[in-house]
Each structure stands twice: as structure tokens, then as C-alpha cells.
Amino acid sequence: MVRSLQWKPNATVAAVIEQDGQFLLVEEHTEDGVRLNQPAGHWEHGESLLDAVRRETLEETGYLFEPTALLGVYTCPRPNSDVVYLRFAFTGELHGHDSQRALDAGIIAARWVSADALQADPARWRSPLVWQCIEDYLSGQRYPLALIRAVPMA
């Protein structure tokens, strides 16, 4: 029997943060040009999902983020590629901002954008996940963080 390599998705985290009708997004350089995305990035080995979303938000925006709910778990294939993203999106609260912090490479700036302005310009979305997460947030979708369980090996 011939065994093939096991396929694995690219696990990512994202923060959906709203204040006063505006959503915190990052304007960033991508392979497809300048796009808008939630503060998001890859889940790194050795960290929890919650630590990953805290870290990515800080690195990309300078904001201290505390997740309060799981918004959803999403899959999205990258066009013309074998890559599939598995996104864990969270919502929560901001607890400070370091305006002097250097942002991750590729990030132009953190931007506050209304849902209407974002919805009107899908060509600027990094992926369809950007709008889907905001749409789910606006619909009131929330799941308790207790759904996420880290179980150590015995």
C-alpha cells in the first residue's frame, strides 16, 4: 500500500473588533496588491488560539485585544492553489493602544472602517472571509470560548 503525505490546512486566527460602528482592519501589501483584512495571521506552534489572536492583533495594529467569544470557524481555499485556510475568528475588547509600536512587515496601517464602506468595496478585501466574519458578527453570532479545549497528552 502506498501512503501519501497527510494534507493539512493552514490554521489562522482573526480578530473582529467593532467600536462605534467602525471595524478595526489592517491595510496590507499582498500578492494581489493592497488589501484590507482583519488583524489575522497564522497560529504558531506552542501557543493557544487565544494567545495567537492576541499576538496577531498587537503585531498588526498595536492594540491590546482580549477575546471574549468565538465568532466562528471558517474554511476558505486559496484560488489556484492547494492551500486551504482554516480560520478561527474571535471578537472581544480592546484594552489599550501602543501608537509607537512598529507594525508587522507588509502592514501599511490599522484602519477603522464602517461595515457599509467595506461592503461597498469587495475588491479591497483580502479574501471573502473579511466580509463573512463581519456579517456573522453583525448577525449576533457568538460562541463561548469554552468550546476551545486544549487537552494535554497523558
Image (cartoon, rainbow, N blue to C red):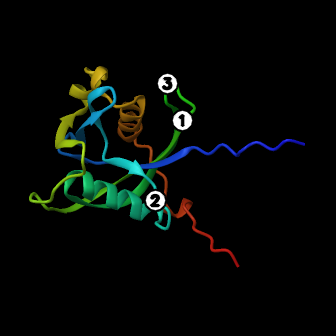
Looking at marks 2 and 1 on the same chain, the residue that comes earlier in the sequence is marked by 2
Give the camera-side residue of 108 and 97.
Answer: 108
The residue lying furthest to the left in this view is 100
The residue lying furthest to the front in this view is 2
Whether the residues at callouts 3 and 1 have beta carbons within 8 Å, the answer is: no
Residue 130 vertical placement versus 140 (above, below):
above
Left or right of residue 145, residue 59 in this image: left
Residue under the point 41% across and 33% down = 132
Residue 133 vertical placement versus 48 (above, below):
above
Tag 2: amino acid = Glu
Please provide percent x and percent y for residue 126. Answer: 34, 31
Dividing the image into 4 quarters, which one contains the N terminus? top right
Please provide percent x and percent y for residue 88. Answer: 47, 49
Residue under the point 52% across and 64% down = 146
Question: Which residue is under mark 3?
Answer: 79
Tag 3: amino acid = Pro
CA distance separating discs 3 and 1:
8 Å
Q: Secondary structure at mark 2?
A: loop
Question: Which residue is under mark 2?
Answer: 44
- On the question of residue 50 being in view, the answer is yes
Looking at marks 2 and 3 on the same chain, the residue that comes earlier in the sequence is marked by 2
